[in-house]
Image: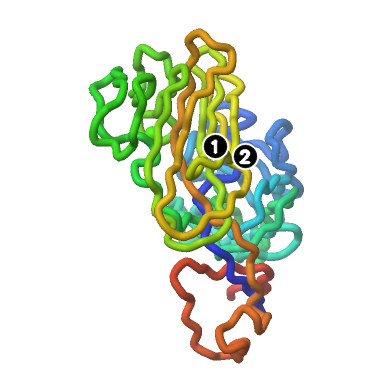
Amino acid sequence: MAQVMLASVHAARAQTIANFGFESPALAANSFQYLPAGATWTMAGEAGIARNGSAFGNSNAPQGNQVLILQRLGTADQTVQIQTAGCYTLKFKSAQRPGNNQTFKVMIDGAIIDYVRPTGSSFTENVLPDIFLPAGNRLLKFVGVNPLTGDNTAFVDDVTLVKNPTVQTVTNPGFETPVLANNAFQYNPVGSGWTFSSNSGIARNGSGFGNVTAVEGSQVLLLQSTGSAERSVNFTTAGTYRIALKAAQRTTQHQSIKISLNGTVIDVITPPNRFFTDYITADVTVAAGNRILRLEGTNPLGTDNTAFVDAIAIEKVSAPQNWSSAATWPGGTVPAVGAAVVIPPGKRCCWIKISMWIPS
Ligand SMILES: [Ca+2]
Ligand SMILES: [Ca+2]
């Protein structure tokens, strides 16, 4: 029995999972350790971390040099803070210990999201069913099930939790066009689709502005002094939106960035340092049609200050609709068991509760 929810589609953004690749603590070469301290994950039973070449015979880690061990009924969990409610996809890579046949389950807040039986001793990617997660702290847990009894172990690595993709497209959202020469920057470049002012443009990694490496691609927007960049964005449907972006200061400078849509200021942000910080603006109501998205330096301290922006995404914010509610459906009828259902463009199905039989 399962319940599902229809939720609007949101911009893809990875949720931070601490020690997602089980690289901490770093173990000695060719070793493994049960219940290691300092792993962030809380482990119990026959769980631990194995380094490449350990006596478990684990295949080389797909990420880094170490992987999670789930032997027999071993478990590993950690609390993940979900910043924004929405539809999430959990992915990781898993493998069997050579010759073993382990099954483990993946749980969030005690609910089983899926049972996983790795197909062999080489790591393959597992993509779990989309699930709706409310904002707040959620307990992510891997649990060895060992349904065949005996001594069986599986390995897990590279755990990611990603919020699902946007419907609203911003062209050239990461300032990768035009492609500049290595280590270059350019004021007011042509061909980006953005309209710049004289004190704004694009900086490539290694430019004289000292920008840290771009988080998306190899280039970022530079906003010096009161420089600005704007472009038209076509909103295909009216609704409530918010803008996600990454921003950083030039070295130790102090620039603020005003973000506006069609002349309405949505937010003003001041990155804390030279490293890129994630921002999500306040919600804004937008009518359908072309709107001008504008980013503008406000240079509150005067003199010469620059900030950088990368990876702009626009998310539609809307409350999920419950599958079991008649109001969700055109015609007001909830589909019967076994009915064929068409999910329209811009909507996606997201599980809120899953229970299933263990695979035999
Ligand atoms: Ca790893
Ligand atoms: Ca970029």
Q: Are marks 1 and 2 in contact (CB under 8 Å)?
A: yes
- Say if disc 1 is inside 8 Å of ligand 1: yes
Q: Amino acid at mark 1?
A: Gln
Label 2: element kind: strand
Q: For the N terminus, which image quadrant?
A: bottom right
Considering depth in this image, is 121 or 135 the residue closer to the camera?
135
Of the numbered discs in the image, which one, if any, rests on residue 137? none
Residue 138: x and y in percent read 73, 52
Q: Residue at x 60, y 91 (%)?
A: 336
At 40% from the left edge and 53% from the top edge, which residue is drawn?
A: 290
Residue drawn at x 62%, y 87% is 332
Of all residues shown, which one is farthest toward the front?
263
Which label was assigned to residue 66? 1
Which colour style is shown?
Answer: rainbow
Q: Is residue 171 above or below residue 191?
A: below
Q: Is residue 148 visible?
A: no
Question: Quadrant of the image for the C terminus?
Answer: bottom right
Q: Is residue 307 above or below residue 175?
A: above
The location of residue 75, given as percent across then percent down, is 71, 51
Residue extending farthest to the top is 303
Q: Which residue was labeled with disc 2?
A: 49
Residue 207's image quarter? top left
Of residues 112 and 215, the one drawn nearer to the viewer in this rendering: 215
First in sequence: mark 1 or mark 2? 2
Q: Position of residue 137 (x, y in %)?
A: 75, 48
Callout 2 crowding tier (Cα within 10 Å): few <14, some 14–19, many ≥20? many
Q: In the rendered image of this protein, does residue 263 appear above or below residue 93?
A: above
